[in-house]
Image (spheres, coloured by chain):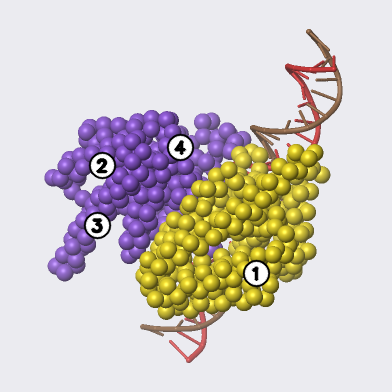
Chain colours: A purple, B yellow, C red, D brown
Amino acid sequence: MSDRQRTVKTAMADISRHGRPKSPAKPPVGRGPGAGWPKGSGSAHVFAAIHDAILTLDLRPGEDLDEASLVARFGVSRTPIREALIRLAGEGLVVLLPNRGARVAPIDLANIRGFFEALELCQRAVTRWAALRHRGADLLRIDATMAAFAAAADGDARDLGDLNRTFHNAIAAACGNVHIAAAYGRLLDEGIRLSRLALTYEAPLQADRHEHLARIVAQHRRLAASIRAQDADGAEALAAEHADLFRRRINRYLSASLAQEIRLATTL
Amino acid sequence: MSDRQRTVKTAMADISRHGRPKSPAKPPVGRGPGAGWPKGSGSAHVFAAIHDAILTLDLRPGEDLDEASLVARFGVSRTPIREALIRLAGEGLVVLLPNRGARVAPIDLANIRGFFEALELCQRAVTRWAALRHRGADLLRIDATMAAFAAAADGDARDLGDLNRTFHNAIAAACGNVHIAAAYGRLLDEGIRLSRLALTYEAPLQADRHEHLARIVAQHRRLAASIRAQDADGAEALAAEHADLFRRRINRYLSASLAQEIRLATTL
DNA sequence: TATCTACACCGTGTATACAAAACATGTCAG
DNA sequence: CTGACATGTTTTGTATACACGGTGTAGATA
């Protein structure tokens, strides 16, 4: 077996170890034809599982994905695997190399400025429009997701990325512009990867972690309040500030890790 | 044969009548296994052909796409057809209905305001950043595509949509932000469909057509000049103005067609 | 006549078989 | 010893076979 296959299988095994995925990793009854998932759900399951694994970095950026390993892991044939990979490529999470397979989209740290630039632009737009156009149900969702994040932050949950994304997606759902909301959603996905990449360089229990979380929660609260008050300018300004907080945090971690690597490289 | 199949075949036959596609509609040698396109190109060809047909409205918005007809039309099996449809769905040009096939994404005139809003936002950003960050090769491409559009407009070419899109894509390529450029590219695609939809309601040789084209060409020229001069504010303002010109043109045609339809409906 | 149901047909989702391209390995010539 | 070439293996791209879900229709019943 080649090295490519091993890496994928290892990462997928990690999923099980972490308790993911929520849905069963294998079809209810067994293998073989006619014994799989209901009907159109095999491809959807594979897509969701790989999507999740990429966002959690269980499948690391740049890692090779060969179809044979995925077939073995998910117990479906190559057809739904390939469909899932194509869909993931459409979302920018996977890169397809003609005649040479697929790999997890690398995180382009060289152009990270462009990422934050796009994130700020979309976040400002989405938040402003949400303030202007939200409906009752939107506010309920925004408040609920905000509370979920705040509770998890209080409770010392380890990974707040998903909850933060859910909060901002709730705002995006209220903005009344599917085009920008879709682009924003992708940026949020990429942001989760960045955030978790930075976490790997972060000391597990950093000194200012609680302070930082409190700042995020406070900004979320002000964001939700200005949206509720239909204060477009205020919401947009807060969105920019919030994006900047994220940017500074990531940049801090990345430059710290860079310094660390330089230190390592020079002492060798 | 069902009605669904007939509609697709008719539209595809239109492609041949119009002289499209540029690449051969069938593999060089013939049908059957082992006689198709090189290797990974069958799917790519189908994707490009359907993509083109959707943008030209040869495949009309909302039209059903069944795999059997596409198989017959392109001479490849269902597998590359399905891959192409999935990719197109990823770009928002096709809608996949679980267990019930695919259809060309409808043009959502009800939310057209959101489209123009997103277009203006992305066009402003992309054009501003292009002014700030362009490189030499970018300017060459921008000028070349601008000249191509202007020449075609002078020469009374019938369909300037592609050339206009190429010009703005050249600007997007110079903006140094792949995230927003990608979102902008999709909006330009949808804009072409909108433009051609409006054209169907337009009298073939409208009185103010030349005046309108001259205005577009003039704006393109000023856009390129401000980008070259690295005048970010000027470029962004022009981008907004240019988007607004497009919006007003589409809205004019659409409300004219709406009035026409109401007139028709009330006289019946 | 209207409605409900059983059934057959059609089309999609998945599995698998086959072909071609890329990759690795080993051999031979220089 | 090095490099180029040939061959076998691996992996992807495509074709095809099969099974399930959805849909429409015909017949029965109220």
The disc at residue A251 is 3
Instruction: Decide which of B215, D24 is in the foreground and name it.
Output: B215
Q: Spatial distance from mark 3 to mark 2, Cα to Cα?
A: 19 Å
Question: What amino acid type should be assigned to the residue bearing mark 2?
Answer: Gln
The answer for which chain carries disc 1 is B
Other residues around mark 1 within 10 Å, as few (<14) / some (14–19) / many (≥20):
some
According to the picture, the residue beneath numbered tag 2 turns out to be A219
Q: Are marks 3 and 4 on the same chain?
A: yes
For the residue marked with disc 3, what is the amino acid?
Asn
- Distance from Cα at disc 1 to Cα at disc 4: 62 Å
Q: Is residue B187 visible?
A: yes
State which tag comes first along the sequence, 2 or 4.
Answer: 4
Mark before the other along the chain sequence, 3 or 2: 2
Left or right of B123 in this view: B106: right
Q: Indicate the secondary structure of the residue bearing disc 3.
A: helix
The chain letter for the residue carrying disc 4 is A
| Identity of the residue drawn at 76% across and 59% down | B14
Q: Which residue is mark 4?
A: A25
- State the SS at label 2: helix
Please, what is the three-letter code of the amino acid marked with disc 4?
Ala
Is residue A111 rendered to the left or right of residue C27?
left
Q: Are marks 1 and 4 on the same chain?
A: no
Asked if disc 1 and disc 3 are in contact, CB closer than 8 Å, the reply is: no
Label 1 belongs to which residue? B210
